[in-house]
Amino acid sequence: MKKTLRKTRLLLWIRGSFFILGRIPFLLVLLFFGLFAFQVNDQGMDMMMAFGSMDLFHPYVLAFIGLLVIWSGVIWYVSRIALTISNLGRIVERRVRLTDSLEDPNCGRDCGLKKDHIVVTVDSAYEHTTGVLAKVIPRILGAVPYIIFIWAYISVNGFNDGRVIKVLFVLLIGIIHITYLCYRTDLLVRNKRIIKPTDARFAMPEKTDVKTVVKMQHLHSTTKFFIPAAFIGSFVYAWITASGTPSLNGKPGLVILCGLIFYTIISLFVMYISNWLRFPFFTFVLVLALLFFLPRNNNHALAKVKDQHQEEQIAARLPDSTYFESWLTYKKEKGSLFQKDSITPVFIIAAEGGGIRACYWTAQVLKKLHIAHPEMYENTFAVTGASGGTVGLSFFYNYIFERAKAGVPALSDPAFYAPLDTITSADFLTGVTYGFMFPDLFQRVLPWPIQSWDRAAFLNKGFSKVFAAHTRVNDAGSTLLDQSILTPWLKDANPFHRPAILFNSLYVEEGQKAVFSPYRITKEYYEDALDILDATKMLVPMKEGMVSSARFPVITPPGLMMQNVNGREEKFGHLVDGGYFENTAVQTAQQTVMMIKSVVKRIKPAGRIVPVIISLSYGSDTSGHREAMGAGYEAAPLAGGINTLFRWIDGVKAMSVKLDPDLNSINFRLTKFKGDRIPLGWYLSEPARKLIEKYADVNHFKFQKPYKALKPFLK
């Protein structure tokens, strides 16, 4: 009998918990988002690593803990109010005595009910359970932010190096906070600020009048001061935080917490409006946005350069083979190409995608190679990349372009690259996260586009801002990144002095590789590739080429290309991350080599010209095999397909090298040992930066193998 009774009570509590949690779906979604942001994805775990490496009283640490406390408090408040005002009984408006429901209260038999009145039986045990859960669950949910943080922090930092102090500090704050929430009413009673209330304020059915609920829950001061301050303050603080980046003091975690606070309060407004109107308000807005607003509010058009001569500049580009022939002639006349054992190497750099880890790895490898062998810069014909690899290449070579204006760059001097280290490892995630969580999310429920709210524009601005802070800014207040993507080649007396940068992207509508290039790419060598400038007749800034090669959803949106048709702009199609087509960028490098070989065969220059592909990629040195899939085993075909795709790309590259014995491809692969955490995203913690610097060392045994393979082509 007792066993059956316990089983019945357990089922009652489970049933009641699902019923209560079903009233606050928005909160659950936001909590899962917070868990993903800080614990599941590697970028969030890298933020935890950054948190662990800072002092306890560092401004970032204190701000993070403060926002964590506010998020916890807002969750408690919103869940408490939402559960009380939820329309838990859509039929039962209010409880009345049976006699009050009769047409004639004094009738004896065959009594009739008043119009719109019914008689119901109430499950008192279930009603009591839901009342208790309505009281307890907000307190449990208020503890979840602390649990998420502690879980994420320990999983990355453990208890080593004295880092346990921070997690214990947060744990202590969380215990004090939740304890206060549990005994808050008792404290108010003890201080004689209120009369001891009964648990009737948690009873079901609900009170739909918010003022009544706030009064019963003794939340007048919280509603009047704390909630408006948290709502407005979270948005303002996120904006200020995002405005202060890029920097090395990463702040994306602060913006994420601000967004969680902001949308937790928004969820209360949405639930209240839905209950007030007795209408699924959120579903209505979602359908409206998807069916009516989305086709009209695309604010993701590529940034453009305002130049009335842009069509002439685009048309003035030389075809690929003519460009290389002119480059080779210029270099030979100038005598700037070096030879090694009667061989003139021509380098083509291919940088694999992978967010900021690829960006920083690319810049670090090129830095080390140029410090040891500055002569390779003159013999580099073209560089090409995808995603973060493109960003790293662009920062590196544009930095040299910009610094060269003040004289010959000291490529062999390590001090020359110090600003570049800061540029390529800055926090680009904070700005684009703010754009994603606030203005661009608001844009989705507006029927007209606001270009400045485009979240990709925040990444654009981040690239430009950090580059301007460490290079020369012209009289117009812009750098090379803000100017036309053709500026380094068309507005220079010696355009062939600089390596060509090829920005790989993907033309979504056709599933076609698309390229921004300083020379006109032809089908003869770059088969089935779209020359974006030639197709659109529109010039974009250099930084837009970088962003368009690195538009990895969801954090950055597809970029809308506009086509210039007789002076009128028309929609042409969308660009996404170049890694979707070919993440290593080696295919574009191989096509460039094919073009070089064809030109060399035709013009028969004196001496031997040997193209050399230097591939900068990301890999893993974990021994054995990966851990078997857990809960995601049903998605094995999808994951296997993605993994197979990238293996296929690597396999094609390896096979092409074997089929062509004259194709020299040397791969500098970023080592990743088990336990290393180098995130895919737009932010690197200091420990992650140190790991990359450790592996990009000419003395590291993993770096030595490709370095030795490259040395025969260097002085």
Image: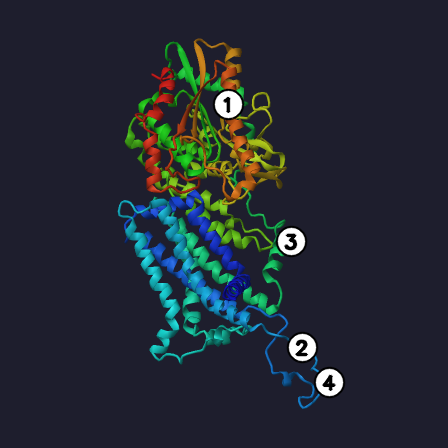
The numbered mark at residue 110 is 4
Residue 408 in picture, x, y percent from top left: 33, 26
Q: Nearer the viewer, mark 4 or mark 3?
A: 4
The numbered mark at residue 292 is 3
Do we see residue 592 in this rendering?
Answer: no
Q: Residue at x 46, y 49 (%)?
A: 36
Please identify the quarter of the rendering in which residue 335 is found.
Answer: top left
Q: Is residue 362 above or below residue 1?
A: above
Question: Which sits in the foreground, 645 or 640?
Answer: 640
Does label 2 or label 1 sit earlier along the sequence? Answer: 2
- Residue under numbered circle 1: 653
Distance of mark 3 from mark 1, alpha carbons?
45 Å
Does label 2 or label 4 sit earlier along the sequence? Answer: 4
Please identify the quarter of the rendering in which residue 277 is found.
Answer: bottom right
> Badge 4: how crowded within 10 Å, few (<14), some, or many (20+)?
few
Mark 4 is on which residue type? Asp
- Residue under numbered circle 2: 118
Q: Outermost residue toward the left?
A: 162
Distance of mark 3 from mark 2, alpha carbons?
42 Å
Residue 244 in picture, x, y percent from top left: 37, 50
Q: Outermost residue toward the front?
A: 1
Does label 3 or label 2 sit earlier along the sequence? Answer: 2
